[in-house]
Image (tube, rainbow, N blue to C red):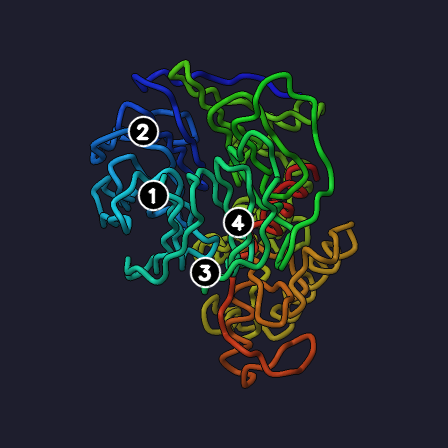
């Protein structure tokens, strides 16, 4: 079930695109501006609107960290904006100076692709803002583009109706020349796809009664939204959808799962939690107060003041060692230190036995992952754990014991969203 939360009516022309980061919503329009909203209450940021394009703004997308926003326009440029200040960080002139209709950032924020009305593509190195390679498709306009979750491939769609799969060397790996009879208006990768070299039609969804202008997958790949709206986007961290329209408005929708109360509690601050409420949380999400309650329940009330003074929350609790208990918390009793560690290990065991899917646990720490990343061996790990492993284990895989070909760690946004949804539902 989907319910309308609010409608944003600040643009003065068609809304062409909308995009979420973890904390912000960006929209762009034929009125030459971009508007930035806080997803907490959808209030507009002080530096919004962003004015820097000379003509209609067709597309916008956030970097993985959310600190930068890319936008492209009929004025033949792709502009990079700072989301800290709202200032222009860089202006990328498209080769050939043709109107830029689409832009896409890779999930690892290493590459940026822009596509233009003359069928040309530009691949940019995003950190340096330098042009890396160009490509083109004759007699068409590029209107759709999306990177694969692994950041090594991207797909483009054009008014000609073709879909083309490219690698970072601008080689075409596959061309589906008759993907749609009346042209491609949008394309997006499912988050679970890590790599591919060809495309094959799997399903055709024909429930729409009007042209489909936009589509988007949820970050966990469980939902697909499409429609006769100019733009649609799922929030990566909340059950929200933003849709833009030619009526100059943006609608914000909440996706409900039918469990009244659970959705509301997931979006509140959690103030005034009782012990029963705490017990339903994952230990890593415990507050300092939750830890204090747990200490009292375990007969360790004498340590409450020490733990509070050192700001020990759930995450810190799970990371305690004999060394930190002795040197930082100054617990002199060996027996008491051992008791605390034994109780912490019991907490970890209870978490593992409480139905947490094994794929949500880091293979190294066996704890629920908070910042999952994909290593060169194809497995996902907690970022801090695998980074420490690489620095101390001579770059071998924890799972296969084979050498890692690269130390590059790619954020696994799909897994992170799946973990978030699981935590909300439990």
The mark closer to the camera, 1 or 4, is: 4
Report whether 375 appears left or right of 169.
right
| Residue at numbered disc 3 | 170
The mark closer to the camera, 3 or 2, is: 3
Q: CA distance from mark 1 to mark 3?
A: 24 Å
Q: Position of residue 184 (x, y in %)?
A: 53, 35
Q: CA distance from mark 1 to mark 4?
A: 21 Å
Q: Position of residue 298 (x, y in %)?
A: 68, 53
Q: Earlier in the sequence, mark 2 or mark 1?
A: 2
Given the current orientation, which residue lies at the most extreme front position? 139
Which residue corresponds to the image point at 69% horizontal and 64% vertical from the top-left? 345
Given the current orientation, which residue lies at the most extreme top position? 247
Secondary structure under the numbered disc 4 in the rendered image: strand
Which residue corresponds to the image point at 38% horizontal and 48% vertical from the top-left? 120
Q: Position of residue 274 (x, y in %)?
A: 62, 34
| Residue at numbered disc 4 | 155
Who is closer to the viewer here, 123 or 189?
Answer: 123
Q: Are discs 4 and 3 less than 8 Å apart at CB? A: no
Q: Earlier in the sequence, mark 4 or mark 3?
A: 4
| Residue at numbered disc 1 | 69
Crowding at dot 2, Cα within 10 Å, few <14 / some 14-19 / many 20+, comes out as some
Q: Earlier in the sequence, mark 2 or mark 4?
A: 2
Q: Position of residue 152 (x, y in %)?
A: 52, 61
Given the current orientation, which residue lies at the most extreme bottom position? 394
Label placed on residue 35: 2
Who is closer to the viewer here, 143 or 309?
Answer: 143
| Residue 253 shows in the view | yes
Crowding at dot 3, Cα within 10 Å, few <14 / some 14-19 / many 20+, comes out as some
């Amino acid at each position: 079930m989907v319910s309308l939360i609010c409608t944003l009516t600040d643009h003065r022309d068609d809304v062409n695109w909308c995009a979420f980061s973890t904390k912000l919503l960006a929209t762009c329009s034929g009125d030459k501006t971009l508007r930035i909203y806080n997803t907490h209450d959808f209030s507009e940021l002080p530096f919004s609107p962003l004015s820097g394009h000379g003509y209609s703004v067709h597309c916008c997308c956030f970097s993985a960290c959310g600190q930068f926003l890319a936008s492209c326009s009929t004025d033949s440029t792709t502009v990079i904006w700072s989301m800290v200040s709202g200032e222009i960080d860089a202006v990328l002139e498209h080769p050939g100076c043709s109107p830029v209709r689409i832009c896409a950032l890779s999930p690892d924020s290493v590459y940026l692709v822009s596509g233009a009305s003359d069928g040309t593509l530009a691949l940019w190195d995003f950190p340096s803002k330098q042009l890396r390679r160009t490509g083109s498709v004759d007699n068409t306009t590029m209107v759709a583009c999306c990177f694969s979750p692994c950041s090594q491939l991207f797909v483009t769609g054009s008014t000609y109706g073709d879909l083309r799969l490219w690698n970072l060397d601008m080689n075409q790996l596959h061309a589906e020349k008759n993907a749609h009879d009346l042209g491609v208006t949008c394309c997006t990768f499912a988050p679970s796809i890590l790599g591919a070299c060809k495309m094959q039609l799997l399903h055709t969804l024909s429930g729409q009664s009007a042209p489909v202008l936009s589509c988007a997958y949820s970050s966990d790949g469980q939902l697909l939204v499409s429609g006769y709206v100019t733009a649609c986007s799922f929030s990566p961290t909340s059950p929200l959808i933003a849709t833009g329209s030619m009526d100059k408005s943006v609608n914000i929708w909440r996706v409900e799962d039918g469990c009244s109360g659970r959705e509301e509690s997931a979006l509140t601050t959690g103030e005034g939690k009782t012990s029963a409420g705490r017990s339903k949380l994952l230990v890593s999400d415990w507050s300092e107060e939750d830890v204090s309650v747990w200490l009292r329940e375990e007969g360790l009330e004498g340590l409450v003041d020490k733990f509070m003074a050192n700001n020990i929350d759930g995450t810190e609790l799970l990371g305690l060692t004999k060394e930190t208990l002795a040197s930082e918390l100054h617990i002199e009793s060996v027996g008491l230190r051992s008791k605390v560690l034994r109780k912490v290990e019991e907490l970890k065991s209870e978490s593992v036995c409480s139905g947490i899917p094994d794929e949500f646990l880091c293979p190294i720490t066996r704890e629920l992952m908070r910042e999952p990343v994909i290593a060169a061996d194809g497995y996902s790990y907690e970022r801090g754990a695998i980074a420490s492993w690489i620095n101390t284990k001579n770059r071998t895989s924890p799972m296969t014991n084979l050498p890692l070909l690269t130390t590059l760690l790619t954020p696994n946004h799909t897994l992170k969203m799946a973990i978030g949804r699981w935590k909300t539902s439990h």
